[in-house]
Image (spheres, helix red, strand yellow):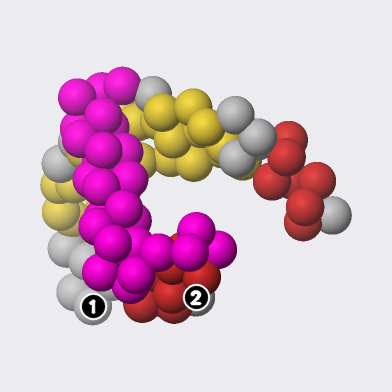
Amino acid sequence: MNWNELIDAVAGKADLKKSDASKVVDAVFDSIGEALKDGEEVRLVGFGTFSVASRGASEGRNPRTGEKIKIAASRQAKFRPGKGLRDKLN
């Protein structure tokens, strides 16, 4: 499912116009992104939990040349599915 298909599905299930559904989907993902940017955890009971994990700096190698390179520390989004989502899949 891509972005437009998601908007179509939301519009159909919520009986909304596509333009309104697009605003809703954008607002939900913007809100989740902003919370993660602020270091908060987003818990959607029955669906899952979005969180931020810190990844330390490390040293890697350029596979083409074998030269050592430094990989900077970063923050990454993580998702842990909730029981309701796991039950739907199994």
Q: Is residue 15 above or below residue 73?
A: below
Q: Residue at x 77, y 52 (%)?
A: 88
Residue 59 covered by magenta stretch: no
Work out whether residue 32 or residue 78 is closer to the camera in this orientation and state it.
Answer: 32
Crowd band around label 1 with a 10 angstrom C-alpha radius: few (<14), some (14–19), many (20+): few
Q: Quadrant of residue 20?
A: bottom left
How far from the left and from the top, in percent, is residue 47? 60, 40
How far from the left and from the top, in percent, is residue 84? 73, 40
Work out whether residue 11 or residue 46 is closer to the camera in this orientation and state it.
Answer: 11
| Residue marked by disc 2 | 1
Work out whether residue 84 or residue 15 is closer to the camera in this orientation and state it.
Answer: 15
- Does residue 15 appear in the picture of this structure? yes
- Does residue 56 appear in the picture of this structure? no
Q: Residue at x 84, y 54 (%)?
A: 90
Q: Quadrant of residue 28?
A: top left
The span picked out in magenta is: 13-40
Q: Quadrant of residue 55?
A: top left
Residue 27 covered by magenta stretch: yes
Q: Magenta segment, principal secondary structure?
A: helix
| Three-letter residue code for mark 2 | Met
How far from the left and from the top, in percent, is residue 35? 26, 29
How far from the left and from the top, in percent, is residue 75? 25, 36
